[in-house]
């Protein structure tokens, strides 16, 4: 006769149910309050903004892990062999129905501890690009440049190539291309774009974050490319707009014209 | 700035003298003296004039340079030229570096020795932007002064005795005290004052370091507080001091740090950055930097109303008491580095 294995379940009474409710509500509140306070603190922390918000997913994982432990121990009192048996049943359950859900949770753990990106980073996953607003247990939320909130399942993120434009730093390189007519003086055009970049109110320049101005000759136009870092990645588009607008105003003033052929359009 | 302040920087004075002693026209090693606003670099370089007589000439740039006429003066100058406030050689705008570039070209070929002074924020900006560091192999950064040096400098200006009055209970070694904080209630509920913890770790540090608590004279207490508020900047310390001294009497309670809870727009921050790094700038030059995107008037109005900048006959400048707050804020915004 085979020995039957059963989990030593505790008796469930109203007090246990109430305990469970308390744990769930408390975990939820602690996570929300901690996330709110850390987000507020990060906004006041200037250059340490991203370092502070990094604590949010870590807090979430820790609080929910503690809550899960409390919930499990409220119902069962497992020995080692029973825990192994439970893990087997649990694995089978995962295989049948909850695979994606737990893959997302594992993804959250990987993102939290491996940190391929952090809250506040600008990331690209597939064709989606935006600022990471939240790393949740199931999904990561990003805000796109046109202010749409996109929830990306964590499993999708860890199984795809993710590019982080700033990798935890507030400074982010922005590449700005201007195309001018081949008759234009490239040195003059380069000098104007250089001055425009380094005088921008959004620029951040240091030994680690230098700027570069490149001129490249194409058959129908010259490309003047500026690479510079923005003080805060939230100003990425303002920086781009500031440099482009002021550079074109100065180009117009100094007679540097746009190309007669639009870059990217194939001539018939 | 007091001419006696030069004595506060004896090491830096020594480095300047050493640079002058090793100067040869074949290999002129130009010097850059770098400090924040009011920190005493003018006194330091002016002290060279009586010592070296006709060998040296001092040419301060009092305002933004608009043409290259100053180069003719440099060419006519003696073998050592002290050019003060060189941050006035450029404007942070498109085409605003031409005079600076001309000066750097001159510095690269001249057989004269150039001793230049710069605002630290302008210098830190120009080093990566225009690689000016390579033109000035000898760089002298003025250090922050301690309470003792500030005390000596300030009291040396008095022949009468100053009375120090301890009217603030600041000697109690309390780790945690309760203060008050006014908070704004949400949904238009007005303000409320709440008890707020005030933590002072200095008694703990004294205990951890094993030192015994020493009785500090009121006089020293005043200057410790002054040095802390001024962050070792002699010009700021003098300004704070002059506000506190009343009929040869100074009360501890009157030496207070100005509190500025700054929250500025990017445009306002940029205006503050320009004023901070140019030290004194006229409205017209400021407008030239900001045009056409930023209207300086509303930004200046806001900065003045916050007590950060002041406008005088010589131009717009950061108020001494707000220098630390302005610098901290711009560092936090990563606009100075």
Image: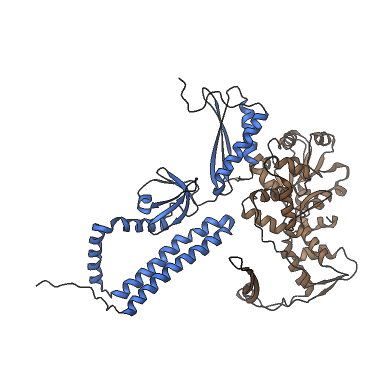
Left or right, A96 with respect to B185, comes to left
- Choose between B169 and A264: the one closer to the eye: A264
Image quarter of the C terminus of chain A: top left
At horizontal 64% and vertical 68% (from top left) the residue drawn is: B190
Q: Is residue B52 above or below residue B152?
A: above
Q: Residue furthest right?
A: B159
Q: Position of residue B126 (x, y in %)?
A: 67, 43
The colour of chain A is: blue
At horizontal 69% and vertical 59% (from top left) the residue drawn is: B325
Q: Is residue B34 above or below residue B230?
A: above
Left or right, B247 with respect to B295, comes to right
* Colour-to-chain, brown: B
* Residue B337 appears in the figure: no
Image quarter of the N terminus of chain A: bottom left
Q: Position of residue B205 (x, y in %)?
A: 62, 72
Q: Is residue A158 above or below residue A85?
A: above
């Amino acid at each position: 006769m085979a020995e039957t294995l059963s989990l030593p379940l505790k008796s469930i009474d109203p007090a246990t149910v109430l305990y469970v409710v308390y744990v769930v509500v408390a975990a939820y509140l602690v996570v929300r309050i901690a996330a709110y306070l850390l987000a507020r603190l990060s906004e006041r922390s200037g250059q340490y903004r991203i370092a502070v918000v990094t604590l949010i997913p870590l807090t979430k994982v820790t609080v929910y892990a503690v809550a899960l432990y409390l919930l499990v121990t409220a119902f069962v009192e497992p020995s080692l062999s029973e825990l192994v048996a439970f893990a087997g049943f649990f694995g089978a359950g995962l295989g049948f129905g909850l695979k994606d859900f737990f893959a997302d949770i594992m993804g959250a753990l990987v993102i939290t501890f491996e940190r391929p990106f952090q809250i506040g980073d600008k990331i690209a996953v597939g064709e989606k690009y935006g600022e990471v607003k939240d790393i949740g247990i199931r999904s990561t939320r990003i805000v796109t440049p046109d202010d749409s909130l996109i929830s990306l399942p964590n499993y999708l993120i860890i199984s795809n190539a993710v590019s982080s434009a700033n990798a935890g730093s507030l400074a982010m390189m922005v590449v700005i291309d201007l195309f001018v007519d081949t008759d234009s003086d490239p040195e003059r055009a380069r000098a104007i774009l250089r001055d425009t970049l380094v005088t921008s109110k959004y620029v951040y320049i240091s030994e680690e974050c230098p700027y570069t101005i490149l001129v490249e000759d194409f058959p129908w136009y010259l490309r003047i490319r500026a690479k510079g870092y923005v003080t805060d990645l939230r100003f990425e588009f303002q920086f781009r707009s500031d440099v482009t607008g002021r550079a074109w105003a100065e180009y117009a003033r100094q007679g540097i014209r746009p190309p007669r052929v639009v870059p990217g359009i194939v001539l018939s | 700035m007091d001419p006696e302040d030069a004595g506060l920087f004896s090491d830096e004075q020594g480095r300047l003298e050493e640079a002058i002693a090793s100067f040869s026209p074949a290999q002129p090693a130009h010097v850059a003296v770098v400090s924040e606003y009011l920190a005493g670099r003018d006194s330091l370089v002016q002290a060279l004039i009586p010592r070296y007589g006709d060998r040296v000439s001092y040419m301060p740039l009092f305002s933004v340079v608009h043409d290259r006429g100053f180069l003719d003066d440099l060419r006519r100058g003696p073998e050592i030229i002290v050019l003060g406030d060189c941050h006035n050689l450029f404007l942070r705008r498109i085409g605003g570096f031409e005079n600076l570039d001309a000066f750097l070209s001159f510095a690269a070929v001249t057989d004269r020795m150039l001793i230049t002074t710069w605002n630290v924020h302008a210098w830190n900006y120009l080093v990566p932007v225009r690689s000016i560091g390579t033109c000035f192999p000898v760089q002298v950064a003025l250090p922050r002064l301690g309470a003792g040096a500030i005390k000596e400098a300030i009291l040396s200006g008095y022949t009468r005795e100053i009375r120090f009055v301890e009217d603030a209970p600041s000697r109690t070694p309390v780790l945690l005290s309760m203060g008050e904080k006014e908070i704004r209630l949400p949904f238009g509920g007005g303000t409320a004052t709440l008890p707020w913890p005030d933590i002072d770790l200095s008694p703990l540090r004294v205990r951890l370091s094993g030192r015994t608590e020493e009785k500090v004279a009121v006089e020293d207490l005043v200057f410790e507080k002054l040095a802390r508020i001024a962050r070792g900047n002699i010009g700021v310390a003098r300004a704070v001091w002059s506000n506190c001294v009343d009929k040869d009497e100074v009360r501890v309670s009157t030496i207070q740090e100005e509190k500025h809870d700054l929250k500025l727009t990017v445009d306002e921050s940029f205006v503050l950055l320009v004023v901070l790094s140019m030290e004194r700038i006229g409205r017209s030059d400021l407008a030239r930097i900001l045009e056409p995107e930023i209207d300086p008037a509303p930004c200046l109005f806001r900065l003045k109303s916050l007590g950060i900048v002041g406008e005088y006959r010589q131009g717009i400048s950061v108020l001494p008491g707000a220098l630390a707050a302005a610098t901290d804020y711009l560092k936090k915004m990563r606009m100075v580095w």
